[in-house]
Amino acid sequence: MRVISQRILEQFWQSHPDAEHSLKQWFKMVLAANWQNLPEVRRVYPHAEGVETSASGVLTVFNICGNKHRLIARIRYDWQLINVRCVLTHAEYDKMQWRK
């Protein structure tokens, strides 16, 4: 798969160094993936969740760093493309602003 917005990952780990290793692992895993649907994603990331949003359709939420952080992305399986929307702390995620 191709990943858009690696910069978002880098910006997050610059302010949250504990997430760097986990985000780099996620990125490496995604580059090697050939997912066709959410059940295939869940074989690698069992806690990945598809969340319906009003503005962006279905976004996939990944737990990062032992569920301390959340990575939110839109996956286009037909194009083999992942667009990273944001990486949030758990507290930021709980505010639900990312769903708008």
Image: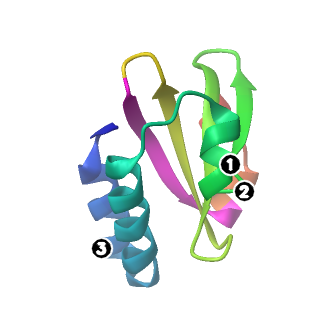
Q: Badge 2: how crowded within 10 Å, few (<14), some, or many (20+)?
A: few
Left or right? Give the position of 82 relative to 54. Answer: left
* Image marks 1 and 2: residues in contact by CB distance under 8 Å: yes
Foreground tag (3 vs 2): 2
Residue 57 % position (x, y): 63, 17
* Image marks 1 and 3: residues in contact by CB distance under 8 Å: no
Q: CA distance from mark 1 to mark 2?
A: 4 Å
Please report whichever mark, 1 or 3, sits nearer to the chain's N-terminal start: 3
Q: Quadrant of residue 41?
A: top right
Please report whichever mark, 3 or 2, sits nearer to the chain's N-terminal start: 3
Left or right? Give the position of 62 relative to 78. Answer: right
Q: Quadrant of the C terminus?
A: top right
Residue for badge 2: 46
Q: Is residue 9 above or below residue 17?
A: above
Q: CA distance from mark 1 to mark 3?
A: 28 Å
Q: What residue span does the magenta drawing correspond to?
A: 80-91
Q: Residue at x 68, y 70 (%)?
A: 67
Judging depth in this view, the residue of 84 and 41 nearest the camera is 41
Q: CA distance from mark 3 to mark 2?
A: 27 Å
Identify the secondary structure beneath mark 2: loop
Q: Residue at x 45, y 73 (%)?
A: 22
Residue for badge 3: 14
* Image marks 3 and 2: residues in contact by CB distance under 8 Å: no
Residue 16 visible in image: no
Q: Which mark is residue 42?
A: 1
Q: Residue at x 36, y 57 (%)?
A: 27
Residue 42 % position (x, y): 68, 48
Decide whether the magenta segment is chiefly helix, strand or loop.
strand
The kind of residue on which mark 1 rests is Arg
Judging depth in this view, the residue of 12 and 51 nearest the camera is 51
Q: Which mark is residue 21?
A: none
